[in-house]
Image (cartoon, rainbow, N blue to C red):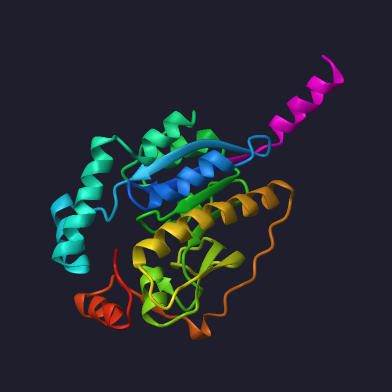
Amino acid sequence: MSSQNSTTTQEMTDRLRILFVTEDDPLYVIQFFKVFFSEYPRDKLDIIGTTVVDAFHESIWKTAWRMFRFYGLIDFIRLSLRFVGAKLRKESISALAQESGIKVVPAKSVNDAQYLQTAEVLAPDVIVSVAAPEIFRQGILDLPRIKCINIHSGRLPVYRGMMPNFWQLLHGESHATITVHEMAEKLDAGGIIKTKEFPLLDHDSLDRVIVGTKQEGARLMIDVLCDIQCGILDATPLDMSNASYFSFPQPKDVRALRKRGHNML
């Protein structure tokens, strides 16, 4: 074997083995993967699988009612048309992964023993959560060789919980803070690895902010994973003394957001 081929083989062997866990969302979460799958360096990162779990772990009708209350009639219709269009075009994270030559690893829950056995065989160095719709228990947290990490579109520990982009807009923040952090059994409580600021406008839309933070979050995650591949993993422990937690916004919160001059779509 030539020295050039030996070098190439060594580089491929040293690639970081990554398993993604995410939710089935053809509108917003997919924006992360469109950027990540097209831009990540193949010589450094090896995506060994992507697991796509049902969003919210509830029926489609319950999810529809949740979205109706959140968006209101007009925006709900507009968003529904987008959703139907994506489905008719067969756009999904699973399809995107397969088009990129990445294995789709099925699961009803990432905490199930059967899934843990499957994931263990894949031997991931890092498991990456991108809007995963369930809390990781100790079994999966202990599974990767290095770490489970998560990306969160809010400043931690202040904006722990659901829909951080919404709450940052509502509270008049000048920017959303995209955060990559270590995962722990307690939600959004692991050490901070790296952050990136995404500017918020005086008159903004939640739609623009979600799409933008997903796209820039993909680039931040690439940076973090490339650092880990180079042996760099520095995490700053969270000071939980000023921690807060936000649940899914209620209609009154949406009215307050619109009163501030922001739109949903």
Q: Is residue 113 magenta?
A: no
**Viewer-proximal residue among 125 and 79:** 79
**Viewer-proximal residue among 203 and 111:** 203
Specify the quadrant of the image occupied by residue 95.
top left
Q: Is residue 2 magenta?
A: yes
Residue 1 percent coordinates (x, y): 82, 14
Q: Is residue 227 left or right of residue 185?
A: right
Name the residue: 46% across, 59% down: 212
Q: Is residue 63 left or right of residue 216?
A: left
| Residue 162 visible, this angle | no
- Identify whether 78 is placed above or below 204: above
**Viewer-proximal residue among 259 and 59:** 259
Residue 229 percent coordinates (x, y): 69, 46
Query: Magenta region's main secondary structure?
Result: helix
**Viewer-proximal residue among 188 and 251:** 251
Name the residue: 68% across, 35% down: 43
| The residue stretch that appears in magenta | 1-17
Residue 14 percent coordinates (x, y): 71, 36
- Identify whether 246 is placed above or below 148: below
Count the numbered circles shown.
Answer: 0
